[in-house]
Amino acid sequence: MFDIGFGELLLVGLVALLVLGPERLPAAARTAGQWMGKAKRMAQAIQLQVEEEVGANQLQQSLQSPLLLEKEQALRQGIVTTAPAAATPVPLGPSKP
């Protein structure tokens, strides 16, 4: 991600040791790790939300395709034109002789 090699990491660690001292370095490293974890989780959450939005938009666009709209209209017209005028009730229970 940052393309940091072992040499650069060692140099940063030595500078941090000189600046913070051996007493405060573990607490500072722990805090930095926590902040990095929070930043990583936040970035993943944002990426997931963006992917969901893009997927929802693609799905909505595919549902608005002209071919699907034509088929939907034909199906609706077929249902309306073939519906019986008056439906006769059908008994639900067992028939008695």
Image (cartoon, rainbow, N blue to C red):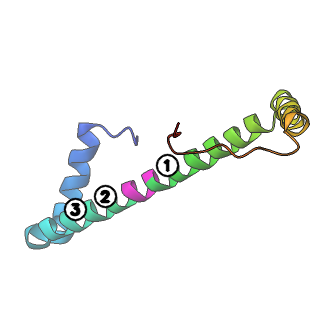
The answer to if 77 sits in the magenta stretch is no
Location of residue 45 in the rendering, given as x and y in whole percent from the top left corner: 45, 55
Location of residue 1 in the rendering, given as x and y in whole percent from the top left corner: 40, 40
Location of residue 63 in the rendering, given as x and y in whole percent from the top left corner: 75, 37
Q: Amino acid at mark 1?
A: Leu
Q: Tell me the tag on residue 61.
A: none
- The Cα atoms of the two marked residues, 1 and 2, are separated by 16 Å
The residue to which callout 2 is attached is: 37
Q: Nearer the viewer, residue 47 or 22?
A: 47
Q: Nearer the viewer, residue 56 or 31?
A: 56
- The Cα atoms of the two marked residues, 3 and 2, are separated by 20 Å
**Closer to the camera: disc 3 or disc 2?**
2
Give the class, few, some or many, for how many residues have Cα within 10 Å of label 2's Cα (few <14, many ≥20): few
Q: Nearer the viewer, residue 36 or 50?
A: 50
Give SS at disc 1: helix
Give, as a single range, the part of the protein colored magenta.
40-44
Q: Tell me the tag on residue 16.
A: 3
Q: Amino acid at mark 2?
A: Gly
